[in-house]
Amino acid sequence: MFSHHTNPEGVLHVTVVEARKLKDEDLIGKNDPYVEFWLDSKYKQRTKQLDGTNNPVFNQTFTFPLENGSSHHKLTFEVHDKDTMGSDKIGDVTVDFADVIKQNRPRDEWYKLSGKIGLRSHGELRLIISFVRH
């Protein structure tokens, strides 16, 4: 189901609070996770990398300016495990924030991360999303 609204001008605030129960991507040891996310894949943002944990606490806030009339209303989040040679994707989630703008109140929720295939949980990501009009 697609949202067909346009946004007022303002700033979307996204706090990547924490993750829990991340699926192990390494054979030995814990993940070295970070979160990469975007409204538009040409402009990606990411958290710091935290070493040796499957329950990282990031507590980092990012902003996305929204232009009046823009139709962006979904954020894509990918949690990765940093390795010596690149990184492995642990899981992802797409979040529709249209209701945050319409109701004008922040949302603080846990989101389940899905993997490439199967129903097995790849962990959860806690996000706080709010919008400030200009």
Image (spheres, rainbow, N blue to C red):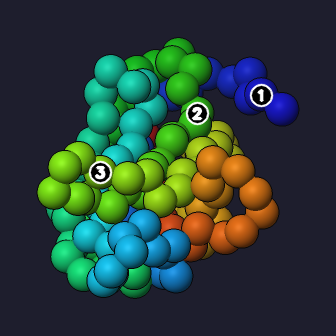
**Which disc, if any, is residue 73?**
2
Proximity of marks 2 and 1: CB atoms separated by less than 8 Å: no
**Which disc, if any, is residue 2?**
1
**What element does badge 3 sit on?**
strand
Residue at (53% x, 56% y) in the render: 91
Who comes first in sequence, dot 2 or dot 3? 2
**Which disc, if any, is residue 68?**
none
Amino acid type of the residue that numbered disc 2 sits on in the rendered structure: His
Q: CA distance from mark 1 to mark 3?
A: 31 Å
Q: Quadrant of the N terminus?
A: top right
Residue at (45% x, 74% y) in the render: 24
Amino acid type of the residue that numbered disc 1 sits on in the rendered structure: Phe
Amino acid type of the residue that numbered disc 3 sits on in the rendered structure: Ser
Residue 89 coordinates in the image, percent (x, y) = 43, 52
Residue at (67% x, 70% y) in the render: 121
Labels 2, 3: front one: 3
Who comes first in sequence, dot 2 or dot 1? 1
Residue 90 against residue 3 in the figure, above or below: below
User: Label 3: how many residues lie within 10 Å, few (<14), some (14-19) or many (20+)?
Assistant: some
Who comes first in sequence, dot 1 or dot 3? 1
Residue 111 coordinates in the image, percent (x, y) = 61, 65
Q: Residue furthest top?
A: 69
| Residue designated by label 3 | 87
